[in-house]
């Protein structure tokens, strides 16, 4: 079974010993030079191909390009019916806590994760698509998971610096650490406030999640109606793919990426619709969303 969550951590990288100095030697023979030249050419060809594939490491930062944002915002409604919950699964629970509302009085959604975390990287795709159905983002950024962690360099987004506007929900995101290290530790980025820490300690723990997964990220609280801990699909579905490649495959409901990402977005949409009393009707009235509300989410415990 693929691990679907990550416990916040500082470092898992082993230090490497220093290489020994080589003794002086004469210049290499011509045959060796030819061989080295061939290796260099091959290395350049591989590097060019790697960059053309749009690796996350090669496109680490910057705002989400308008064309990519349009793709994420405009997936056809028929896609919801074709995918439904897709392959989305994982640890989520229907809870009965006190209503969680934002400053505007709207149902509040709280996301907590970290930029280094590959499971957060995968889950953000579904979170962004789901929230785009209820509002819109400004200043959403491109990012990737840590290159020295499991599922290295997974293409994703960052909520750090982004704002979200909606007439149906309030959204708060806390990206606790970056995807780069300072003195061997992932650098701190944002600090959750006391209420957000309380949510994590209360609902990212038994009986809502297994004891061995307590405190895992990503963590998502939807108005104290539903809590999600960990990714709802494995990050390896996105391995080695650029943002544009992943986004292009979302329009085909048969692809693994669509079944994972759009399926996650649909499950999250159903949970948000329950929190908003099924508003807006244009989203929450979709038969596939209604089916998720009455089956997948009703069965959560």
Image (cartoon, rainbow, N blue to C red):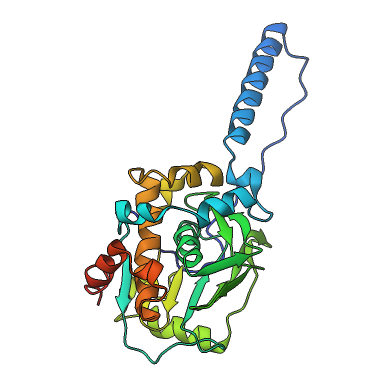
Q: Is residue 59 above or below residue 275?
A: above
Give residue 204's quadrant in the image: bottom left
Q: Residue furthest top?
A: 30
Out of 267 and 105, give the one closest to the viewer: 105
- Residue 281, image x, y percentages: 38, 72
The answer to whether residue 162 is seen in the rendering is yes
- Residue 127, image x, y percentages: 47, 64
> Residue at the spot x=53%, y=78% of the render?
167
> Residue at the spot x=36%, y=89% of the render?
97
- Residue 205, image x, y percentages: 36, 80
The C terminus: image quadrant: bottom left
Q: Residue furthest front?
A: 282
> Residue at the spot x=31%, y=55% of the render?
81
The N terminus: image quadrant: bottom left
The answer to whether residue 86 is seen in the rendering is no
User: So how many labels did they put on this image?
Assistant: 0
Q: Is residue 50 above or below residue 172?
A: above
Out of 84 and 120, give the one closest to the viewer: 84
- Residue 53, image x, y percentages: 57, 35
């Amino acid at each position: 079974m693929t691990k679907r969550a990550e416990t916040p951590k500082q470092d898992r990288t082993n230090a490497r010993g220093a290489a020994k100095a080589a003794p002086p030697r004469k210049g290499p023979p011509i045959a060796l030079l030819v061989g080295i030249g061939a290796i260099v050419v091959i290395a350049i060809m591989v590097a060019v191909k790697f960059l053309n594939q749009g690796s996350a490491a090669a496109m680490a930062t910057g705002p989400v390009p308008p064309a990519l944002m349009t793709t994420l915002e405009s997936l056809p409604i028929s896609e919801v019916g074709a995918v439904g919950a897709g392959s989305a699964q994982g640890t989520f629970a229907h809870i009965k806590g006190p209503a969680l509302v934002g400053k505007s009085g709207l149902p509040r959604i709280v996301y907590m994760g970290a930029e280094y975390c590959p499971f957060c990287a995968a889950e953000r795709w579904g979170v962004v698509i789901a929230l785009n159905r209820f509002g819109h983002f400004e200043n959403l950024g491109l990012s990737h998971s840590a290159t020295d962690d499991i599922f290295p360099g997974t293409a994703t987004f960052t909520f750090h610096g982004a704002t979200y506007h909606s007439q149906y929900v309030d959204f708060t995101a806390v990206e606790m650490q970056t995807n780069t290290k300072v003195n061997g530790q992932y650098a701190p980025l944002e600090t959750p406030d006391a209420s957000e820490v309380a949510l994590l300690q209360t609902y990212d723990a038994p009986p809502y999640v297994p004891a061995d997964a307590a405190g895992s990220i990503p963590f998502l609280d939807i108005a104290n109606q539903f809590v999600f801990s960990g990714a709802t699909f494995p990050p390896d579905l996105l391995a080695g793919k650029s943002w544009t490649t992943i986004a292009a495959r979302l329009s085909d409901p048969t692809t693994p990426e669509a079944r994972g990402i759009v399926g996650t977005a649909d499950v999250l949409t159903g949970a948000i619709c329950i929190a908003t009393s099924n508003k807006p009707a244009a989203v929450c009235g979709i038969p596939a969303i209604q089916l998720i509300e009455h089956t997948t989410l009703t069965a959560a415990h």
